[in-house]
Amino acid sequence: MKKSIFLLLLIGLILNLSAEMLWQEPIPIRQGVNIEWFRTGTQTADGCAIYVWSDTKLGERDLWAQKVDAQGNAVWGDPLLIDGKPDRQEDPMITMTSDNNFVIAWIDFSDDLDGNVYAQKINTQGQLLWQTGGVPVCTYPNVQISLNMESDNEGGVYIIWVDSRNPGKDLYGQHLNSSGVPLWQINGIPIANDIGDEEQNTMLPDGQGGLMIAYTYSFGGAEDIYAKRFLSDGTMAWQQPTILSNVNGNQGKVRMATLTNGEFVFVWEDQRNEDPDIYAQKIDLNGTILWRDPFIVFGDSGTENFASQLNPRIVATSDNSVIIVWEDKRLDNFSTDLFIQKISASGELLWDPDGVPLCVAEFAQNEARLAPDSDGGCYIVWDDLRNGDTPNDDIYGQHLSATGTVLWEANGKPICNAPNQQNSALVKISNNLVFINWMDMRNGSVGIYYQVYNSAGVAQLTENGQLMFWGLSGDAPLNNYLILPRSQDVVIIWQDTRFANIGYQIFFQFLNPDGTIDLEPNGIPVTLSTGADQSSPAAAVLSDDSIILAWVDARDENPKIYLQHLDANGNRLWGDYGIPLTESTPVEQKDPRVSYKADQNQVYIGWSNYDTFAGTLRFYVYGQMIQNEQKQWGPDGIMISYYPEQDFIYHECTLNDLKENYFSWQDANLTEYTQSIFTKKVEATGETAQGWPESGLQVSTYPINNWDCKQRFPVSTLTDEGIFVMWKDARGDDIENYYGQHISPNGERLWDPLGVNLADYGREQLNVSIADNPLFRNEIVFAWTENIAGMGDIIAQKYSLSSIPQWGDFGYYVVQKDSMQTAPYLARFNNGGMVIAWTDYYNTVTEESNINYKYINSNGSMVCNDPGGYVLCDAKKNQYNPMIAVINNESYAVWADGRSSGKTEILGLYAQKLSNETTAINDPVIPSISKFTLLQNSPNPFNPSTNIQFIVNDITNPYTLNIYNLKGQLVKTLVKGNLEKGTHNIVWDGTDSNGNNVSSGIYMYSLSNGKSNQIKRMVLMK
């Protein structure tokens, strides 16, 4: 039954992709690397270190590792891909095994949205030793998180995780042998699963082939701490767990170190008194308590100046003692310092009873990590804010002798104090070399850096560390991107958060018809960094393919709009930092809009300006016109939404749309508490056009003093007879429908003065998109989302310029499904046909959104063999809000793509080129036959072979028929060379280019003549 359901789903997926997308895969316009650093690293036996992280450089989140030496070399060359299955792999752990290899475990979301546990073994040469994709450690339904892992003494590992299969949170574990075979029950055995929650834990080998673990337990109240020991076969060594602490108050953040003779020391944060103190205890292999109880490492509760001691860390030293470091507020109630203590195996405090002040510099020091030296001392690294507090985090370190003597400079040695943030340091000792690494944002995005010290404390690498791996962070925020057509390509513009700790910037990229990009990957900024945020980009392409942009910039005291002019090649013409739109600096400027009047070579710019008018602060609409690189309306522009001085205080106006020299805005009447829509045409001189009121034309005469005069969000398009404006209107029933008005160039309302209700279903309407093509300004076509009982469907309508609906009284449904479809974008080809794309939530399994699309002929007929639309992108996670640019009869779509998302949503920008499958407006027949046609394979699904058929009509160019997997990797080339005209039939036997059988799954086959591609999907099911 399950196989049948799976088969139906796959068949549906294949049928969905029958329209022609012209590029084999969507093009990443802005795809970040988004490194997640988990402090995962280990020393090696040959004087190196291995570090593990996850990143999204391939789109989805994968796991990577790199080995580095003390000379700053990446030993494996390129990073090693540990796992690249679909969806995301994250939160890795690594441990060295007793056979001098390494096991990496992680949380894997490829086959379970809640996450499973997988593991992989690698050797010191960077080779995977277990199966590709790792071995499943736990695939039980529900959430598995928070890994812990240690080696056994036979080349295997113990892995512990927090598991939600039962009510509450429990600890489960698995023992893998050296080959990755699970030795305990499949999906793990319960390590601690009492009623209540067991979560935070600390684990080490017991020296006898088993493991010792301590964990926190709570049941409707404070946390207590227990310890258990497990033998190699998974049996518990004691009849009952040992209670380390179960007094009143929270005891948590337990950590552990191993001494000789089968003894273990635990340290924790203890809140049995007024504030947290640091406590410890030692037990043996039998679970016997060995130190006095309670054992206080340091506690000042009950004293006059008590303060918090927090987050202890512990390490065993080479002289069979332990060193404990903690965060301490005794000197500063707001910022933590670091104190440290050494305790002998017999429980004697060896250093100052109050602890040794490790670092008491200004601001906070925290997140310490330790590693032992070979002389009874230790190395410590921590995050340090002494150089200006956050975001000026730095990495500092110290070396303490066995007696607590500071061997590096007082208050710590600066390991890295480069600009911006460095944190999450890790220290490992390899052949008496001290490897320290950390997460570093000195360049705005996250990188991983490291430094090596010899035993004398001398740095072996460059000052502030050696870069190990770096990649773009941040994303392209939703609704802050544009796509605009140029003569031969498109430009994509977006707000980018890659330098979030420095300031968001506006970036852009040129995308060619063949899917290549002209600028460096991930685009270039419109200005150099100003150290402040840029947002709300607006732009227009000029007749010479240059671009004028406007955006809101926070570099000044108040938010202000700046401009840039980019030539056709992307060079900055108005300086590396742009120019301010106005010389004056009002309280705020926002809502920039840019429009180009090509016949006069005029660029119009509009915005909302917040400043003092008639003695009161209000937003009003302003405008500027630029011609021949010069501002034509003075240094500060002109007020568009002008009112007599006595009326200023009763209105607030914010700009919504600008088409050439027509400004449309929303006017809030502050006396009547109503909203209405105004439009105004302005001459090139800056004067109000003849026939238009100085304050703009109220597009609907619906009375402003009516309580239900709630008109919002106007959008507009030029027509052969003036301008069409439509808006959301709540009149009558307080449900917002779309209304429209057609206005002549002389400011005359051409339709009903009240406005025309464009399609009144008696339901809420939103997300309107108007098709705008200068060749078809004799009619008006638009689409919107119709809210049907909380679900959204997409409807399109055409109106004549005389207000007559052309597609029935209510328009035609583009898509109508029992789910949410929203954010339509409608664009028109030069043949009169249209393409519409939208965000589609029809995936009821994952509840994630895809991008779907359809074609619409000029008569309103839909061109699509699937009522739900073709799939433009159904990658993992959410895809949102497509936008489309048309060049002649080809379209380019861009959308916000969440395939890199994990713990938080990360949005990239992806693009795809679409064919035009509509019929020309003046030609009732189907367009001419294409140069080749790729047909659906048969059988499909198949096992083991399938026939791929295609028709060649043009033999000018050679053809290539390739097979790809879903990651876009070439599997096999079936055809390469010139072909005869006619029908061709090729058999694929399910093998790759090396003759190996490929696994079951979805594959793509692509036929190309070097000018265009056609792609279809097929399913191999064994």
Image (cartoon, rainbow, N blue to C red):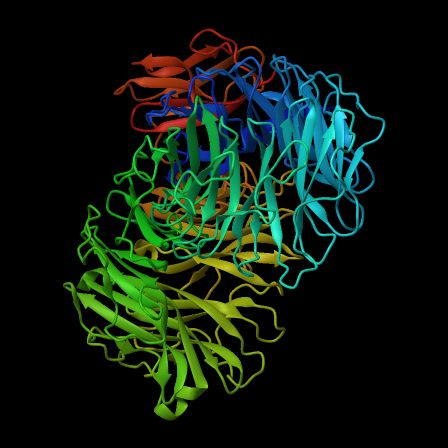
Query: Can you tell which quarter of the image residue 436 is in?
Result: top left
What x and y, as percent, mark residue 16? 54, 33
What x and y, as percent, mark residue 931? 33, 26
Q: Classify residue 56 as left or right of residue 87.
A: left
Q: Nearer the viewer, residue 415 or 264?
A: 264
Q: Nearer the viewer, residue 311 or 813?
A: 311
Is residue 18 among what the camera can see? no
Q: Nearer the viewer, residue 764 or 154?
A: 154
Q: Is residue 522 above or below residue 7?
A: below
Q: Is residue 612 above or below residue 189?
A: below
Residue extending farthest to the top is: 995
> Which quadrant would the N terminus be assigned to in this image?
top right
Residue extending farthest to the bottom is: 646
What x and y, as percent, mark residue 375? 49, 27
Q: Classify residue 718 as left or right of residue 964.
A: left
Q: Is residue 513 above or below residue 105?
A: below
Identify the residue at image location x=58%, y=65%. Answer: 760
Residue extending farthest to the right is: 239
Is residue 931 among what the camera can see? yes
Query: Can you tell which quarter of the image residue 138 is in?
Result: top right
Q: Classify residue 565 as left or right of residue 208.
A: left
What x and y, as percent, mark residue 116? 64, 30
